[in-house]
Amino acid sequence: MFKKGYYITAELRVKNTDKISEAKAALTKLCEETLKEPGCSLFTLHQCSENKDRFLLWERFEDEAAFKQHFIEQHTKDYVELDLTEIVQYFQSDIVCTTSTQ
């Protein structure tokens, strides 16, 4: 069984490769804070194995309104103000199926 919602995949690139560790720490903090938002149930950070300056965010919000609310939260504004990353691409998707061995 899968859970409907507003799913986002975002690819980010660190603007200055000297700041990859700083960006990773800031994104980790953003994940922790975002998961406290009432409309967010998934906000996971992945780092590309081959290009350490690339990150993926997998996100699930209850609906588009919760997703939009995310961008006016102070922790999101604080992250954006750091200006460490840029969005390479992002897209909203609908879950079709999910499998798990757990």
Image (cartoon, rainbow, N blue to C red):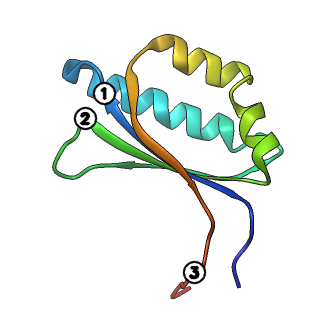
Which quarter of the rendered picture does the C terminus lie within? Answer: bottom right
> Residue tagged by mark 2?
53
As measured in the structure, the alpha-carbon distance from the residue carrying label 3 to the one carrying label 1 is 30 Å
Picture quadrant where residue 77 is located: top right
As measured in the structure, the alpha-carbon distance from the residue carrying label 2 to the one carrying label 1 is 5 Å
Element type at marker 3? Answer: loop
Badge 1: few (under 14), some or many (20 or more) residues near its Cα, within 10 Å?
Answer: many
**Residue at x 18%, y 43% (from the top left corner):** 51
Picture quadrant where residue 41 is located: bottom right
As measured in the structure, the alpha-carbon distance from the residue carrying label 3 to the one carrying label 2 is 29 Å
- The answer to whether marks 3 and 2 mark residues whose Cβ atoms lie closer than 8 Å is no
Badge 3: few (under 14), some or many (20 or more) residues near its Cα, within 10 Å?
Answer: few
Q: Which dot marks residue 98?
A: 3
**Residue at x 57%, y 81% (from the top left corner):** 98
- The answer to whether marks 2 and 1 mark residues whose Cβ atoms lie closer than 8 Å is yes
User: Between 85 and 26, which is closer to the camera in this rendering?
Assistant: 85
Residue type beneath disc 1: Val
Element type at marker 2? Answer: loop
User: Between 35 and 86, which is closer to the camera in this rendering?
Assistant: 86
Q: Earlier in the sequence, mark 3 or mark 2?
A: 2
**Is 36 located above or below residue 22 in the figure?**
below
**Along the horizontal axis of the image, is 71 left or right of 20?**
right
The furthest residue to the top: 81
Measuring from the top left, give residue 97's x and y in whole percent.
Answer: 59, 82
**Residue at x 41%, y 41% (from the top left corner):** 89
Residue type beneath disc 2: Asp
Residue type beneath disc 3: Thr
> Residue tagged by mark 1?
14
Q: Earlier in the sequence, mark 2 or mark 1?
A: 1
Badge 2: few (under 14), some or many (20 or more) residues near its Cα, within 10 Å?
Answer: many
Q: Earlier in the sequence, mark 3 or mark 1?
A: 1
